Image (cartoon, grey):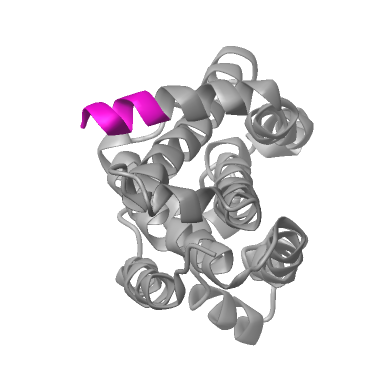
Amino acid sequence: MRALTRLTVIEAKLMLREISGPAFTILLPAALLVIFGLPGSAHEADPALGGHRGIDTVIPSMSIMVSMAMVAFFMLPVVLATYREKGILRRFATTPVRPAVMLGAQLVLNVGVVLLSIVLTLVIGVAALDMHLPNLALVIPTFVLGVLGLFPIGLLVSAVAGSAKAATGYALALWFPSAFFAGLYVPVEWMPATLRRIGDFTPLGAFRQAIQAAWAGDFPHPLHLAVLAAGFLLAGGLAIRFYRAS
């Protein structure tokens, strides 16, 4: 535990030296909330959303989904792939500090970035945009399951990528279709039934739907929870299988 704490502090200092990436990830969701939450239509009850307002459902869930994807698909795998490319993971394998400790430190920091993003989104939404506070008893477990379902995908990307450039390429290849089926470009409610169904079976789409339901005070659909659990088991298992220090 002491090694994890020390390494987390060191990694946090390194992250602060290149703060542009984390800062962008923290600020972008709040910016999206403001952009899409200012129009009056976002504050009107929408029958397509079960009578809820967009500012209380679609918009915050989109913001959180973007934050989670930026960290899980880009920040985490690119850092780990960079460490492999520079031989840092290989050197860790020859020291008493196991590579798992490095992984733990990265997970702590990256989850922290997502949490900061969510807190900022909440503060701005409630204080400036009349957003209702969500049901935290539903949102927190859904968020935890989202971390478990999406972060292993980033670990899998870092496991198969031989360099930071390759990790970025894989992340982009994942991001664009995942974001589409999660409703970032076209709201899920406007999609044909077939596309909506496909989105239900993608980890990012499942997380978006689950966190949106939880934010509105509804229990997430069991299918979306099952998809996230499957993502944890499948991507996590493959990440362990393909992990290499060099």
Question: Does residue 6 show up magenta in the picture?
Answer: yes
Residue at x 57% of width, y 39% of height: 60
Could you say which is closer to the camera, residue 239 or residue 142? 239
Examine the rendering and report whether any part of residue 133 can be seen. Answer: yes
Residue at x 75% of width, y 37% of height: 36
Q: Quadrant of residue 1?
A: top left
Segment tinted magenta in the rendering: 1-7
Examine the rendering and report whether any part of residue 50 can be seen. Answer: no
Q: Quadrant of residue 37?
A: top right
Name of the residue lying farthest toward the left: 1
Check the picture and name the quadrant holding the C terminus. Answer: bottom right
Residue at x 71% of width, y 27% of height: 18
Could you say which is closer to the camera, residue 207 or residue 81? 81
Residue 107: image location, x then y, percent: 42, 43
Residue at x 73% of width, y 38% of height: 41
**135 in relation to 119, above or below:** below
